[in-house]
């Protein structure tokens, strides 16, 4: 597994442990002491885009590779497209080569809703919609999906490219992709005003991180290769999200209105049907319960001031 010390990856590791799997983690940052207490995972502190990382996978001989390491930020990819491409594309090729040499049968890849660009019609988007990436991050993720298809054809390596909608939940940082719940949640936990860009009608498809971990697990059990949305199909506007967070926290938010950010996607939702049909995944966590669990973690972790 790569990126196993990050937000989503750490929940995938938890689930794999619960299911009795041994896990080796390649990550560029050391494991978080709070999340990793008592874990049996073997740690390899290493950049995924290196020959060393490829050799680690080839020697470890996993039957399955979960590849989550990336610089999960659209803004960072625009500021520094070289690092983005190196981590996401070269990193994936290293893992594909490592997996092939190890004789692994399947690679589960973290892709993103960003590959669709920002169509506002025909929501929720199904997988066959045209792909119109709008950032280096999205181009790298899409290139990754194509590499997976090529390795499946060349070497028979099975894969699932999982296009996550907006993931939220405990352990999320403030800077990564789709961090709006963490950002608004921090405001409510610390009593700081919430900065709302635009009219509040922008929508996103929020999916709880433990549902995403379960999608990874189910996709790994399947023998079908392909690209799958990991989503709820439900749109929630920023104003609705703030209201749900207020209810979950019992705190009335002070909202400061800011101008709309140029390039912000207005409406977003991904159809969950293909993942349900193919490997039986459905998101289970009701948004209000997931938000409440997230706020509890934010308060108890003491990381947000
Ligand atoms: N959070 C979301 O809403 C979301 C949405 C769509 C896709 N994704 C994708 O899901 C995956 C996990 O994202 P996350 O939200 O958990 O982000 P995260 O930043 O918490 O986790 C990414 C992990 O990858 C590691 N990493 C980064 N560069 C590395 C490198 N060069 N070598 C080794 N490890 C490296 C980081 O240290 C971190 O532990 C990413 O591929 C991301 O693009 C996330």
Image (cartoon, helix red, strand yellow):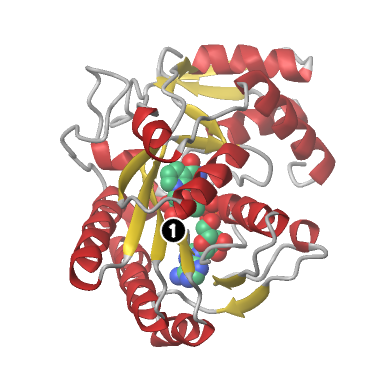
What residue sits 24% from the left and 73% below the top?
155
Q: Residues within 10 Å of mark 1 (few under 14, many from 20)?
A: some
Image location of residue 287, percent across then percent down: 61, 22
Quadrant in which the C terminus appears: top right
* Residue, disc 1: 71
In the picture provided, is 36 more to the left or to the right than 84?
right
Q: Is residue 113 above or below residue 197?
A: below
Image location of residue 294, percent across then percent down: 70, 33
Image location of residue 123, percent across then percent down: 29, 19
Between 188 and 138, the one lying in front of the other is 138
Task: Classify mark 1: helix, strand or loop.
Answer: loop
In the picture provided, is 170 more to the left or to the right than 239?
right
What residue sits 38% from the left and 67% below the top?
87
Between 48 and 74, the one lying in front of the other is 48
Between 51 and 185, the one lying in front of the other is 51
What residue sits 80% from the left and 45% below the top?
301
Q: How many marks?
A: 1
In the picture provided, is 301 more to the left or to the right than 276?
right
Residue 117 seen from this side: yes
Q: Is residue 141 above or below residue 297?
A: below
Q: Is residue 186 above or below residue 76?
A: above
Callout 1: CB less than 8 Å from ligand 1: yes
Image location of residue 274, percent across then percent down: 34, 33
What residue sits 59% from the left and 78% below the top?
45
């Amino acid at each position: 597994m790569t990126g196993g010390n990050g937000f989503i990856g750490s929940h995938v590791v938890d689930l794999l442990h619960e299911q009795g799997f041994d896990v080796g983690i390649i990550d560029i940052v050391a494991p978080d002491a709070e999340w990793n207490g008592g874990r049996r995972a073997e740690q390899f502190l290493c950049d995924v885009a290196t020959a060393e990382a490829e050799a680690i996978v080839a020697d470890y001989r996993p039957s399955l590779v979960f590849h989550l390491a990336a610089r999960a930020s659209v803004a960072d990819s625009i500021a520094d497209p070289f690092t983005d491409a190196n981590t996401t594309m070269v990193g994936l090729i290293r893992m594909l080569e490592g997996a092939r040499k190890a004789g692994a049968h399947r690679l589960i890849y973290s892709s993103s809703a960003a590959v669709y660009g920002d169509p506002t019609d025909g929501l929720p988007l199904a997988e066959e919609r045209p792909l119109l990436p709008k950032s280096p991050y999205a181009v790298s993720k899409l290139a990754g999906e194509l590499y997976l298809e090529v390795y499946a054809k060349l070497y028979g390596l099975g894969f699932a490219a999982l296009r996550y909608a907006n993931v939220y939940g405990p352990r999320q940082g403030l800077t990564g992709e789709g961090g709006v719940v963490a950002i608004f949640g921090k405001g409510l936990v610390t009593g700081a005003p919430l900065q709302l860009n635009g009219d509040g009608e922008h929508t996103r498809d929020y999916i709880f991180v433990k549902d995403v971990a379960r999608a990874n697990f189910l996709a790994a059990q399947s023998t079908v290769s392909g690209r799958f949305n990991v989503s709820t199909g439900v749109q929630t506007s920023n104003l609705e999200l703030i209201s749900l967070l207020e209810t979950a926290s019992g705190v009335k938010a002070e909202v400061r209105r800011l101008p709309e950010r140029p390039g912000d996607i207005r409406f977003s939702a991904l159809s969950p049907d293909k993942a349900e049909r193919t490997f039986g995944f459905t998101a289970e966590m009701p948004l209000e319960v997931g938000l409440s669990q997230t706020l509890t973690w934010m308060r108890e972790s003491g990381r947000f001031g």
